[in-house]
Image (tube, rainbow, N blue to C red):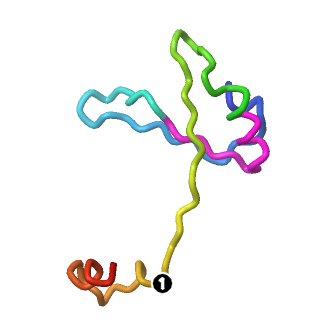
């Protein structure tokens, strides 16, 4: 609800510990529009919510290279290329 006030959200991911079945204490929120994410970041980073300080980190887009999709190369060949 807190993040939804800044714009439409496309995805929320809140990891759960497999053993204790409790939230791990962090999550990932994806907004539909980057402008909404920037606004939420600037206004909520460092804010206290429910007695805990929010520390927001901006996400980074995944960069896919042509080599990462090649199935014929094994680990040793990939390491030699780097």
Look at mark 1 in the image and give the residue it sits on. 66
Of helix, strand and loop, which one carries label 1?
loop
How many marks the image carries: the answer is: 1
Which residue is found at the position 69% from the left and 42% from the top? 9
Whether residue 65 sits left or right of residue 80 in the image: it is right
Q: Is residue 11 above or below residue 53?
A: below
Residue 17 position within the rendered picture, expressed as x and y whole percent measured from the top left: 31, 34
Foreground pick, 11 / 65: 65
Which residue is found at the position 76% from the left and 36% from the top? 39
Which residue is found at the position 48% from the left and 84% from the top? 66
Which range of residues does the magenta coloring cover? 27-40
Whether residue 36 sits left or right of residue 75 in the image: it is right
Q: State which quarter of the image contains the C terminus.
A: bottom left
Tell me which corner region of the image, top left, top right, bottom left or bottom right, holds residue 44.
top right
Whether residue 18 sits left or right of residue 53 in the image: it is left
Q: Is residue 77 above or below residue 43?
A: below
């Amino acid at each position: 609800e807190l993040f939804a006030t800044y714009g439409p959200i496309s995805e929320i991911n809140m990891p759960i510990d497999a053993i204790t079945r409790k939230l791990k204490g962090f999550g990932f929120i994806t907004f539909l529009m980057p402008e909404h994410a920037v606004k939420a970041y600037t206004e909520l980073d460092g804010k206290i919510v429910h007695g805990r300080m929010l520390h927001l980190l901006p996400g980074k887009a995944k960069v896919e290279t042509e080599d990462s999709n090649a199935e014929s190369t094994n680990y040793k060949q990939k390491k030699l290329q780097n």
